[in-house]
Amino acid sequence: MAVNNQQALCCQARRVAQELTRKDARRVVFLHEGIAGMNYRVETEDGALVVRFDLRRHAQEVRDDSAFALRARENGVETPADLMGVVEIHGSTASVRPFVAGSAVPETQEALSRIGGTLAAIHDGCVEHLPERRSFYSFLDDRSDGVWDRLGEARQIGWSRLYSAPLGNRILDLLARRGEGEQARIGIAHGDFKEENLIWHGPDNGVCVLDWEKAHVGDVGFDLGLALFHVLRKSKSPDNHLRAFLSGYLSRAPLSLEGVRLGLLTELAGLAWFARDLVFLQEAMTRNDEEFARRREYFRLNGEASWSAWLSELRAVETAVDGAVCDGTAQ
């Protein structure tokens, strides 16, 4: 992001915070830039706020995030659900929430058990009267959003030899295998339960769950597989951490894992996540704005290395899941 644009957005964040909260903004700090938004910390006399600019979402979608977060909070999950204001401005949606302090989740069995229980509490939330939303991974069911077509276009970033056809074929194979006798469990799915969206407050105070933009009422078995993939794929001890995570999950799980093919779900979720990332990259190829330039160039130069590293991470998670299934942890 250009320096002058960064300065302009800092000023915009200050104005948004003051207008939506009627509080004097004393200091603005850029926090981080995500795929679809930018976050700023704004200091006021009453504490810190977060101003987020969503580049591709409308105000009602941001309000819907809070509906899911509030429902999870009713079930004991800490969330930054207090939306203090939202406004559409200059082609983006700006929202203000309280700033949540904390640290990254440590790689300890105690912490992994705690976040496993947190995910179970989300899944166990009441689904009545929540906004209707499509899953971010709905392409697995209805083929309606162009993901499958775009898998065939991977040659544009030099990956067709590696995985465009193999990836699509493997996903279809896993979907067919899953369809043989297993029923989806329906509940609140977070859709993006991973380390970057968790803030650790310590063993006594637990974890705060952020970023509810992919939350929906849907298949919590798939959501569990996706969480396992994200939480464990960079773990230095995935087998032990998996057991800790599942122990915490099962301590308050809304569903039995009996009959749930967890290894299959984890692989399917990991493959689906990578397929969606490919779709985003294909969209980025058609855009010329600075927001996507660095990411486009990185994947153009490092696509094969990224794919190889990702495969290694997925295999480590699969090995841990298969081990847990064999010894009964995941039953």
Image (tube, grey):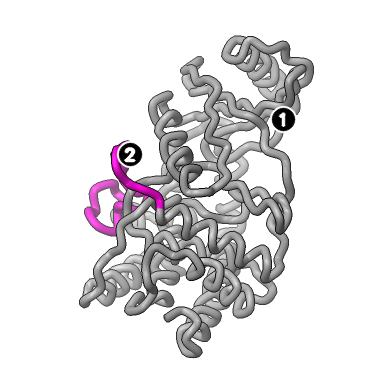
> Which comes before the other along the chain, label 2 or label 1?
1
Q: Evaluate whether residue 305 shows in this view.
A: no
Residue lying at 74% horizontally and 25% vertically, measured from the top left: 47
Quadrant in the picture for residue 177 = bottom left
Residue receiving disc 1: 30
Range of magenta residues: 125-147
Point 62% across, 73% down: residue? 241
Relative depth, front residue between 268 and 328: 328
Q: Does 65 sit above or below residue 2?
A: below
Is 298 one of the magenta-colored residues? no
- 135 lies left or right of 212: left
How many discs appear?
Answer: 2
Quadrant in which the C terminus is drawn: bottom left
Q: Which residue is mark 2?
A: 130
Q: Position of residue 98 (x, y in %)?
A: 64, 29
Rounded to the nearest whole Å, what is the CA distance between mark 2 and mark 1? 32 Å
